[in-house]
Image: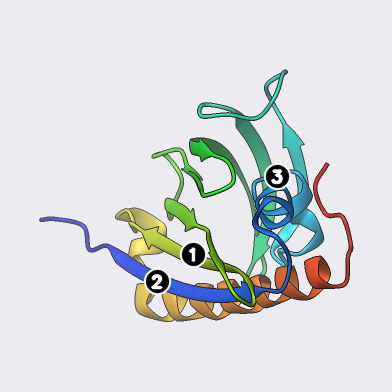
Amino acid sequence: MGHKMYVSEHTVIVNKPIDVVFKNLACLKGCINWSTLLHATEKLDDGPTGAGTRYKHTAGFMGMTSETIQTVRLYNPPYEFAFGDDKDANLPAQNHYTLTEVPEGTQVPLQMTLSPQGGFIGKIATGLLVGRIQKQMYNDLNNFKELVEDGVTIHA
């Protein structure tokens, strides 16, 4: 029996140059400033961020708190950035951003792929969870847009 995958896409346009947007977006420590789910973030590897750099995220969702290890999968400034959970997470998510310069600033599309595992999360209504996560993503991306447009530095 195959696992169902859910793909969500959200796009915001941030009225700032692409390098500023990328620098803020690609910091998996600084995202605590705009992602409402996160309680704590910690960089686990030394040196500059790149593919393979790992971060520990402590997140709360629907009354549950969980720790995940997020690994940077793709780091191509200032255009592309991807990261995701390790495969042993309850609800592994992969996030992929592809930035483009547009007349208004920078277009930031996020594609998120959720791959629910069996077990606990699989037994509760995954569709409901996915709907909530999508709403959260949408809100977080809008938070990100507002902060960066207001000139707040949100990278570490």
Question: Separation of disc 1 and disc 3 at Cα?
Answer: 15 Å
In screen coordinates, is 99 left or right of 17?
A: left
Q: Amino acid at mark 1?
A: Leu
Locate the N terminus and report the quarter of the image it occupies. bottom left
Question: Separation of disc 2 and disc 1 at Cα?
Answer: 8 Å
On the image, numbered disc 1 is attached to which residue? Answer: 110
In screen coordinates, is 108 left or right of 126?
A: right
SS class, disc 1: strand
Going from N to C along the chain, the mark reached first, 3 or 2, is 2
Q: Which mark is residue 24?
A: none
On the image, numbered disc 3 is attached to which residue? Answer: 27
Q: Amino acid at mark 3?
A: Cys
Are the residues flagged by discs 3 and 2 in contact, CB closer than 8 Å?
no
Are the residues flagged by discs 1 and 3 in contact, CB closer than 8 Å?
no
Residue at 51%, 29% (x, y): give it. Answer: 51
Are the residues flagged by discs 2 and 1 in contact, CB closer than 8 Å?
yes
Residue at 45%, 38% (x, y): give it. Answer: 86
